[in-house]
Amino acid sequence: MERKYQVVVVGAGHAGCEASLACARMGLKTLIITLNVDSIARMPCNPAVGGIAKGQMVREIDAIGGEMGWIADHAGLQFKVLNSSRGPAVWSPRAQCDKELYSVLMSKSLQNQQNLEILQSEAASLVVKNGKICGVKVLTGEIMNADAVVVTTGTFLNGTIHLGRAHFDGGRFNERPASYLSRSLSEDCGLALGRFKTTTTPRINSLSIDRSKMTEQPGDKEPRSFSHFTEIESWRKNLKQLSCWLTYTNPNTHKIVGDNLDLSSIGIGKVNSKSPRYCPAIEEKIERYPEKTSHHIFVEPEGYNTNEVYLNGLYTGLPFDIQQQMINSIAGLENAKVIRYGYAIEYDYSSPLQIKKSLETKTVENLFLGGQINGTTGYEEAASQGFVAGVNAGLKILGREPLMLGRNESYIGILIDDITTKGMDEPYRMFTSRAEYRLSIRNDNADLRLMDIGHSIGLISDKAYKKFELYRNTLTDIYKGKTENLPSDKELSPWSIEKANEEVSIHKKYEGYIEIQDKMANRIKKNEDRRIPEDFDYARVDSFSAETKQRFVEVRPQTIGQASRIRAIKPSDIAILTIYLEKQKKERKQKNSENKNS
């Protein structure tokens, strides 16, 4: 049996959900394939959304028409703005979520979406003809024909779970991996695959905790939503926030871990199977920082209707008995009962140097990759890529130009530029420190930066966009001091006069710095957007070193700006490249002139 779709999305994690919803909302007949319909948008690691720089990306997804922010608002059980003691440029919203409710709400969103079908099956291979994707073959033999395919497999791609020195196949604990697709990506699509690893933490029963030995971490008194379309007052009124709690490891904890490092699964797996640098296992922390006598452990609830709590900071691959000893050595957890033990998981990924900035692969036309398959880590990084991959798959089918967000426009643009230009040798995570324009791309102005784009794509409705335009005009009036005839909050809702006043205040605070930053960005942009022909022959440029040629051929930069950010490329290489592009331009112009005169 064969079925025909315009877009097929493989995987229903955070990337796959955003990709499929975007395509369907653009009016395209879309299919999403998942190994288990009960596992849509699962949160196998910390059930939280947002955080440093990540919160900015969630706000950006929402501003363009994505789903994550809205779901997080309605599944969140605690909301905080991180870095609130610092300047607004680095304020980062974060929500601890009810993990089951988040999955249920996202699943419901997919099920209710027009133009979108859900299929529980396994993608066995990709159908490629003449260098172009044609569909997906599932394990039972049926072919799902498609004009474009988006692959968002997360940690399931040839996944292996490690527990102490034991290991077995799995995409998550007690969930089977995608065992067949790696071979097709390699053999049928010509993609080189590597291995990365990540860890998760034990979950314990909250009834076995002594909170008197911990420090309470309540949510903000006036929580801020992720979605621009959440009605703040009614949302705050109905929100019931739960507290998190803070405790610490101690020298005894470190001794237990240090004495058993040889039993940990962290060192198991392929030689190049690296774990996230900025989310390390407790074993790695103790080895890396031997001078430290304690590390933070945040005890975080996993839902309103469960006693399970998450031990944030205690990622581990130790055997069960050692994990129990380690946990019981920590203040407040002396009698803790473990419900789920932590583990490490190793999985295949594709080097993002093999994709364009549109997230389309360079080897197969109309095949797009999003999420952890591109070597990133984190729900928000995955959702951002899934959204962009889905949008660009849709735009490609519709014959429109791709969505290419700049570094000065969004954190999503920085993420995609970084991974497609620099590649990585460890899982990539977003930070505000990666943003050279962070004064301009704040969480508070994501709507002002990106909602026009969302509306032009068709993901922001005309009704919502009219409200946004009224809000933007209100900002202009307040900035100019014309406050006599401002609209009411009811007219502005879900925006408000309070939000407008705050936005104007933040803009005025940074105005001088932003002007300097914008001038710098405009100077850079002159060369940033200068296109490089896809067939440019770097081997012909004798002035390039062998390494320079190798780097350029590996990345195949689309613009001078992207070329300048490739690892190990020098300013002199960019100067030479610019000269050759000018030379080619003159040669083409002269040839066209000769042809015209002949």
Image (cartoon, grey):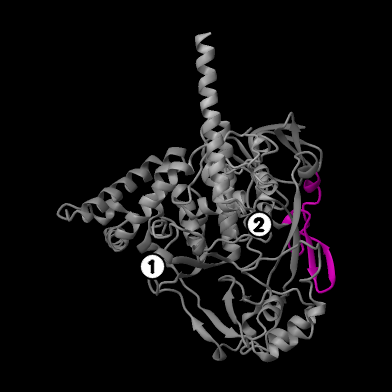
Res 129 quadrant in image = top right
Is residue 23 visible to the viewer in this orientation of the structure?
no
Q: Amino acid at mark 2?
A: Met
Instruction: Identify the residue shown where x is 61% and y is 73%.
Output: 306
Q: Amino acid at mark 1?
A: Lys
Residues packed near mark 2 inside 10 Å, few (<14), some (14 to 19) or many (20 plus): some
Q: Which numbered disc covers residue 237? A: 1
Can see residue 587? Answer: yes
Give the magenta-colored segment's residue range: 156-183
- Marks 1 & 2, CB-CB < 8 Å contact: no
Q: Which corner quadrant holds the N terminus?
A: top right
Q: Is residue 375 above or below residue 236?
A: above
Task: Please name the residue shown 77% across and 83% down the image.
Answer: 322
Is 164 in the magenta? yes
* SS category of the residue bearing label 2: loop
Can you say whether 24 is above or below 240 in the image? above
The image shows residue 521 at horizontal and vertical percentages of 41, 50
> Does the magenta run of residues contain 103?
no
